[in-house]
Each structure stands twice: as structure tokens, then as C-alpha cells.
Amino acid sequence: MKGEGRAVRTRSPQETRRLGELLGSLVARPTLIWLAGDLGAGKTCFTQGLGQGLGVPADEPVTSPSYTLMNHYQGRLPLYHFDLYRLSHPDDLEDLGFAEYLDGDGVTVVEWADRFDDRQREGLTIRISRVDEHTRHIDLLPGAEDEALLVEELLRNWHKEIPS
Ligand code: ADP
Ligand code: MG
């Protein structure tokens, strides 16, 4: 299934945020989202839009949980936002009960997916790569059938707004 990914390009942080917002508005069931990409790629930017689309209150801005490893927000579904950037030891994740969130009751977003062992990883992987200062290439790699449908719906909505 990982080979059947789709890709989009965003040309500003606002567009990346909007892509996340569309995904957040379309998610209807607990979903695991892995965000891969270098520092400054746009992972947090995407997650901020996702929170907006999930209906996280605007007075609760989504910020990078670098120091806490995880932030929890309440939207239509709970949003669990992990950032593994500062992860020094896998035990830190176990202490957080990370495994529970991989199959949890909400939308779990994991920044720095590459720091997590990805063998037999389930979920939707989103890989953001910098093309130039304002442009990002975003690969959408569904791990399962319902995620593939979600990606198709996302792209339908996206292309209605953003010409390719
Ligand atoms: P990450 O969480 O991947 O480290 P951030 O989302 O914190 O990255 O930061 C992305 C940076 O890249 C921001 O400074 C943002 O303004 C800039 N940027 C420029 N173009 C884009 C784009 N098309 N999409 C997302 N971010 C962009
Ligand atoms: Mg970040």
C-alpha cells in the first residue's frame, strides 16, 4: 500500500496549513499520522492546520511539543501531538505510554517519524520535503485502505482550491 502514495506541492506556509486543515476536517475516526521531514520542512505548520480542521479552539494554539514530547488538544476528536526531535532514549516514549496512542481514540500526529522504528508501521505517513524557500513537496502515503480513501478525498478538496 505504501507504494500507492500521492503527492502535492505547497507554495507557502499558508497552503501547507490549509492542507492540514482540510485533512483535519475530513478525519472521521481515530487516525495515526506520521510526519517525516527535516527541520523547517513544515511539520508543525501542517499540524497547526490539522488542529484547526479538527476544531481545536483557536485560543489553544498548536505549538511544537519539543520539550514535553506530547501535547494534547481537544477537538472533534482528541489530537495527540508528539514530537520525537528531542527523544534521547526509546524508554522516554514508553514512559509516556506511546504505544497506547498508536491505536488510540483520537488523531495521533508524530513529528520526526524517522526517529521511530518504522518496520511494519501502520498509519498515514506524510513526508514533507523542501523544494525551495517557499515550496514544499508533500508525499501522502496511506498504510491502509481507509487512509487511501481519506487521501483521495483530501486531494479532491485540495485541487478544487489550489490549482496544480
Ligand atoms: P518543522 O516542524 O518541520 O520543523 P515548521 O513547521 O516549524 O517545520 O517550520 C516550517 C518553516 O518553513 C516555517 O518557518 C515556514 O514559514 C517556512 N515555510 C516556507 N514555505 C513553506 C511551505 N510551503 N510550507 C510550510 N512551511 C513553509
Ligand atoms: Mg516541528
Image (cartoon, rainbow, N blue to C red):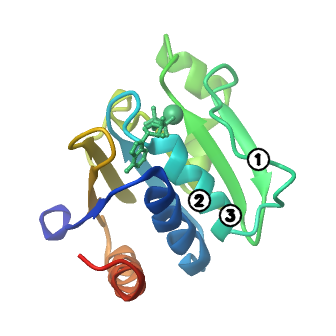
* Mark 3 and mark 1 residues within 8 Å of each other at the beta carbon: no
Image spot of residue 104 (x, y percent): 63, 57
Question: On residue 49, which mark appears?
Answer: 2
Q: Amino acid at mark 1?
A: Pro
Disc number at residue 52?
Answer: 3
Query: What is the secondary structure assignment of the residue under circle 3?
Result: helix
Residue lying at the far left of the rendered structure: 3
Other residues around mark 1 within 10 Å, as few (<14) / some (14–19) / many (≥20): few
Q: Nearer the viewer, residue 153 or 14?
A: 14
* Tag 1 residue: 61
Three-letter amino acid code at disc 2? Gly
User: Ligand 1 within 8 A of label 3's CB?
Assistant: no
Tags 3 and 2 touching, CB below 8 Å: yes
Q: Earlier in the sequence, mark 1 or mark 2?
A: 2
Q: Residue at x 35, y 84 (%)?
A: 149
> How far is disc 1 from disc 2 in space, using C-alphas?
10 Å
Name which quarter of the figure residue 156 lies in.
Answer: bottom left
102 lies left or right of 124:
right
Residue 49, image x, y percentages: 59, 59
Q: Position of residue 88 (x, y in %)?
A: 49, 10
Which amino acid does the dot numbered 3 rest on? Gln
Q: Position of residue 18 (x, y in %)?
A: 51, 66
Number of marks present in the image shown: 3
Task: Please rate how many residues cluster around mark 2, counting C-alpha atoms within 10 Å: few if below 14, some from 14 to 19, many from 20.
Answer: many
Quarter, ligand 1:
top left
The residue depicted at 51 percent of the width and 57 percent of the height is 14
SS at badge 1: loop
Compared across the picture, whether 28 is left or right of 89 comes to: right
**Which residue is the extreme one toward the right?**
59
Within 10 Å of disc 3 (Cα), the crowding (few <14, some 14-19, many 20+) is many
